[in-house]
Amino acid sequence: MPDPSTYRPAPGTIPDSPGVYRFRDPAGRVIYVGKAKNLRNRLNSYFADVWSLHARTQQMVTTAAGVDWVTVGTEVEALQLEFSWIKEFDPRFNVKYRDDKSYPFLAVTLDEEFPRLQVMRGAKRKGVRYFGPYSHAWAIRETLDLLLRVFPSRTCSAGVFKRAHQIGRPCLLGDIGKCSAPCVGRVSPEEHRAIVDDFCDFMGGRTEQFLKRVEREMLQASEELEFERAARLRDDLVALRRALEKQTVVLGDGTDADLVAFAEDPLEAAVQVFHVRGGRVRGQRGWVVEKVEDLTTGDLVHHFCRQMYGEQEGETDVPRELLVPALPDDADALADWLSERRGSRVSLRVPQRGDKKSLMETVSRNASEVLQRHKLRRAGDLTTRNKALEEIAENLGMDGVPLRIECFDVSQIQGTDVVASMVVFEDGLERKSEYRRFIIRGNPDGSGMDDLSAMAEVMRRRFARVKTDQPAEPLPTGELPGIDPLTGKARRFAYPPQLIVVDGGQPQVNATAEVLAEMGVTDVALCGLAKRLEEVWLPADDFPVILPRTSEALYLLQRVRDEAHRFAITFHRQRRSKRMTESALDQVAGLGEVRRKALLRHFGSLKRIAEASPEEIAAVPGIGLRTAESVLTALRSPETGKTGER
């Protein structure tokens, strides 16, 4: 394995100007391309301590055998060169936004004499205008069927078109008025192209203008007593409005924008894009990508823009406005580069308020759901779960696969409301009935409670219950260990795990190992999963176990850790919320929870209750005048303040 120090450039040889750099493997292949505002600072970061780098970056720098660079004048030039090199070399370590499926587009072949409307997938071609993408091909065909009545354009293949031209008879669509039949000369190439241009304008967002034009022609035909033509235009108007109903207006100002949102974990990121044209959502796409480095959200935006808009043909691929969750460091240069691609100014910004921010939240929720589905897709496969358990056993040196895994996590805020969670996975699946929550009691000497002390307390309580629930004598014939013979149900904590996972690194693992040794627990494996680099730590080891990024074992350990974290955070928030809702009303004798809630529901806040008169408070059902006076006394006492806040 190459050592990064062997190919590190000599001190002072790296310039501090903008540029683009390439890492090469021993065979000379380019494995990574990047750009930097300051080449010296950026490249030096790769030659720091290897263990301090992101896991994917570690793999890249130890695979590479050399690095070279090219300086440029501006950041925009660096963007252009970076895009060119990535397209040329296709480096294996660069972030690649790959579709989670092949999305269909509505395509118009403008490069043909008689343009054709069709459903098209795959790479985009020059000379073809695209609308979408759509989630399903049937959605395109349904919309197209409505619009062909108004825009009778060619939809047939070259073979069908040529055959109709040879026999001099159009197809069925030509006979029913859904094609202008250019194949038999019913319209000239210029007239057919005018129909297609109107279709493109309508799909491109100029809907209101076209609707008004059709309506105006309909009224004019009616005034001229051309009732058949007026009726046909009326039906056209209905068809256009039905087509528009399928595309909900989300931004009333007719915005042309792409909204991009990310959901990420340390190893992967899911991206969702909503294409809004003329204020309507015209398409949606989604990807899941591997994070090559320790990337910020702004870095993900940079990579997304380079790949999304760099390889497409036609100015319509780049919107007027790009709404993102965070701006990259090179936002100005990126906006200039996008403007060059479009041919007019492109705005790159983060929505702060209003409808655009609300829509961005919707896009973000979609991204979170995509990432969650991506992670859980593996959980539904029995073969995949078995493979994950076998990989865990192999990498942790266990004698058998861990059929029962327990994961523990601690949640607190500066030592207050300290709680812990225990989640259980059996055969690689969640066993929610076995989940447990712990309220940390604290140290007997009254000293502060940190995560290590809390984890130690949880382990003592958990394995003390194992000993309590285990039978002291051999069980009678027919009785099962861990089952209460009276109720037939499993005793709490009756089954010990084969593997314990703690949320943390080396300190948490070593502290837990000490407690297990102290309690004589020697038949349970232990490991910790650190969030920063997704490293697996074993007791008393100086170096972590690095699992491959595509390892099923790593995916399962991540799911276990994330579920424990979620369970602990939820319980901690419940405890904190309950404590914060305690008020001066608790001091009023005889005022129970039901009447406290009735008071708060009626007045809305403690401040308004304190400002009310005894008669106004007594008007609340269930509250007498004497109780009302007691409430005001409690709220207006010097200890609680005039508004009753504590």
Image: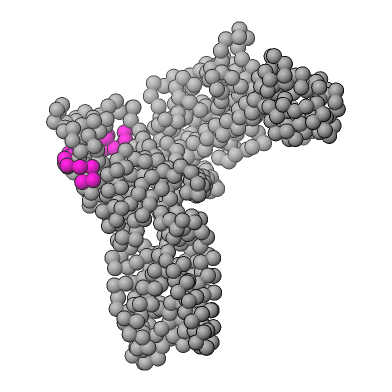
* Residue 604 x %, y %: 70, 33
Q: How many marks?
A: 0
Tell me if residue 523 is in the magenta stretch: no
- Please tell me in which quadrant of the rendered image residue 318 appears: bottom left
* Residue 107 x %, y %: 38, 68
- Please tell me in which quadrant of the rendered image residue 472 appears: top right
Say which of 297 and 564 sits in front. 297
Position of 538 with respect to 488 (left or right) is left
* Residue 581 x %, y %: 67, 27
Say which of 85 and 200 sits in front. 200
- Please tell me in which quadrant of the rendered image residue 159 appears: bottom left
Position of 443 with respect to 303 (left or right) is right
Residue drawn at 39 percent across, 69 percent down: 201
Residue drawn at 33 percent across, 85 percent down: 188
Residue 158 in sight here: no
Residue 28 in sight here: yes
128 vs 449: above or below: below
Quadrant housing the N terminus: top left
* Residue 531 x %, y %: 45, 30
Magenta segment: 57-77
